[in-house]
Amino acid sequence: MKNIQLISKRLKKINYLYTKMILNELSPFELDHHFEVLLTLAVEENQVTQNRLSELLQIDKSRTAVIVFDLEKRGLVSININPEDRRRHYISLSPLAKSYIPHIELSVEKINELAGAGIEQQKLMTFFEVSEMIQHNLVNKLSY
């Protein structure tokens, strides 16, 4: 019998370990897995709608809504309705969330360094290029 390897299995394991280590670093802030949402909002220069946030995070709109409402309840984001189009909700970081961003960035940098330890920079760049190509191939195939 042929031994078929699932690319996703390896990527899931990496994602699990990577996220768990970042969450351990950020445990005093009790951010759950939502640190990625806060970081995404922090780097965007324009106002971010809930739909745009879904696109940036590559998750469905209903999941984004649940996350955003949870973050709002915890005082980490505010939701503002566009007065010209009430269907558009702008999401922005609260001052409390903004104070967390340097800690999130530092934790991500630390775990990135740990994950890349002993790996030549060129090999790491190749990994990112190849994973981007795999994603591109799969997205293009889904478009049809």
Image: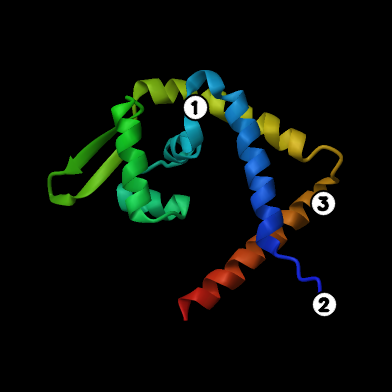
Identify the residue shown where x is 67% and y is 54%: 11
Q: Determine whether, in the image, residue 59 is placed left or right of residue 107.
A: left
Most distant residue in the front direction: 1
Can residue 30 be seen from the camera position used here?
A: yes
In what element is the residue under mark 3?
A: helix
In what element is the residue under mark 1?
A: helix
Numbered label attached to residue 115: none
Neighbourhood count class around disc 1 (C-alpha, 10 Å): few under 14, some 14–19, many 20 upward: some
Identify the residue shown where x is 61% and y is 38%: 19
Q: Determine whether, in the image, residue 111 is placed left or right of residue 28.
A: right
Q: How many marks?
A: 3
Check disc 1 and give the amino acid type: Ile
Percent coordinates x, y for residue 34 in the rendering: 46, 36
Specify which label sits upstream in the sequence, 2 or 1.
2
Identify the residue shown where x is 77% and y is 50%: 124
Percent coordinates x, y for residue 12 in the rendering: 64, 52
Neighbourhood count class around disc 2 (C-alpha, 10 Å): few under 14, some 14–19, many 20 upward: few
Label 2 and label 3: CA atoms lie apart by 36 Å
Of 122 and 37, the residue lying toward us? 37
> What residue did someone put label 2 on?
1
> What residue did someone put label 1 on?
101
Q: Say which quarter of the image contains residue 71.
A: top left
Can residue 108 be seen from the camera position used here?
A: no
> What residue did someone put label 3 on?
122
Label 2 and label 1: CA atoms lie apart by 50 Å
Percent coordinates x, y for residue 29 in the rendering: 49, 21
In what element is the residue under mark 2?
A: loop
Percent coordinates x, y for residue 67 in the rendering: 37, 40
Check disc 2 and give the amino acid type: Met
Check disc 3 and give the amino acid type: Gln
